[in-house]
Amino acid sequence: MAHVLFGSINQMGLGALRSAVARGHSVSMITTPDLASFFRDDPENPILDKVNVETIDDYTDTDALTEAVQRIHQRYPIDAGIPIFSASAWPLTEACARLGIRSTSAKATHLAGAKFACRQRLAERGICDLPCMLAESAADALDFASRYGFPIVLKPNRGLGSIAAKVVSTPEEIEEYYRDYNNLLSSLTGGLRQEFSADGRIIAEAFLDGTLCSAEVAVASDGFKLLALSRRKRSGTTDINELGSTMPGVTDPDSVAHIHDYVASVIDALGFDRGIFHVELILDADEKPSLLEVNPRLMGGTLPLLYKSLTGADVYDILIDTFLDKPMGPPPAMTASVASRVLGARERATARADLDDNWQAAFAADTVFCDIPLQKGQTVERLDHNLCSFGMFAVSAATPEEADAKADRLLKQMEKVIGIPLCH
């Protein structure tokens, strides 16, 4: 058995810890007090008491992180360092690179996280031609919009969870974005604030109209693999926030083959040598892909659960085997369709005071997954970015269209039950 090291995780990352422990591996993890707020162990089925968890003060301090990894490595040699959460991906891979520990390429991870540099690399390879520039002021963004037309997208050069990403359609909205940007960043704390402040630059890019899609891909010892394509549901008001996923998102064989080749060229150009990656795309009316961004991590949200319900395969097992350089063979085939929905409030609101403690039970028979820790009288914030959602659920059906319709119907029913206006 192996000794695997994880960087700090999010809630879904607990599944990776469970998979590693269940398969008999020794498991270590390094986190920080602020990043630990992104996961909570299950008190009825705890996993963290079976993991060697070490805490450091600052995950952006790669020297301190390297020292922590080295201490663990000296006690029990580490076979692989596995990034699973965007906020900790580059520091972990950098520490592993310094110590000669198998992991994802630190150079590729850093390049993918720097959106403008990533687009420059891909443009040099003739892969991506989406207009994009560093816009250090509102005047820069206005100049960009005058050349390429509204709407445009403004977002941090580094970041996660769609925080501070916005589609703007007028000069006034550009001015408002730059006025509010520093206030928004100052509201962040700990690792999130450090992630954004590490590179406070803003990029402007042309807005791509089409279907948001994510490709879940692996680079294993036996080559590039396309694991899944999911269609993402976007907010009708912001076009930035994601409201759920449908898998499979693309079913036409020719379209799937074209997306496979396109994403493989992106991953190769960035230099990724090992791991599982979440690649976001926009598909036009003919399902031709254009790159939005590459995330050097495992699929997030409900996607691991959706993937298992469709294929019977645990993506966490695939993740660990990939980092231990085990060949994958052909990716598992999908046998049905699933759709998930995120619960996000249209405005700051409070759940009904008379909400039954077991209100989710009424939906249990129709869902394959449901995690909505909402209680009566609880106040939730507006869905300003993807990290503001307060729950999610997933359903299954024979076709993607049927799964979407079922999920949307349940979302409307939940909205009535909890008394909070939801994003659709």
Image (cartoon, rainbow, N blue to C red):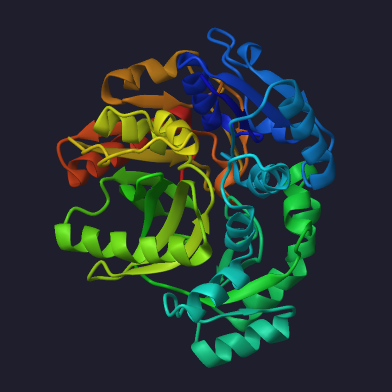
How many numbered circles are shown?
0
Q: Nearer the viewer, residue 230 or 172?
A: 230
Q: Nearer the viewer, residue 356 or 82?
A: 82
359 vs 348, left or right, is left
Q: Nearer the viewer, residue 231 or 99?
A: 99
Residue 283, picture quadrant:
bottom left
Which residue is at a point 41% across and 20% down the rendered structure image?
360
249 vs 177, left or right, is left
Q: What is the x, y in percent for residue 206?
A: 50, 78
Residue 415 in view in this figure:
no
**Against 337, is 163 above or below?**
below
Q: Nearer the viewer, residue 286 or 177?
A: 286
Q: What is the x, y in percent for residue 41?
A: 60, 18
Which residue is at a point 79% across and 46% down the rendered structure image?
62
Q: What is the x, y in percent for residue 8?
A: 66, 34
3 vs 363, left or right, is right
66 vs 283, left or right, is right
Which residue is at a point 54% across and 50% down the rendered structure image?
296
The furthest residue to the bottom: 147
**Against 201, is 97 above or below?**
above
Residue 397, picture quadrant:
top left
Q: What is the x, y in percent for residue 183?
A: 79, 59
Residue 77 in view in this figure:
yes
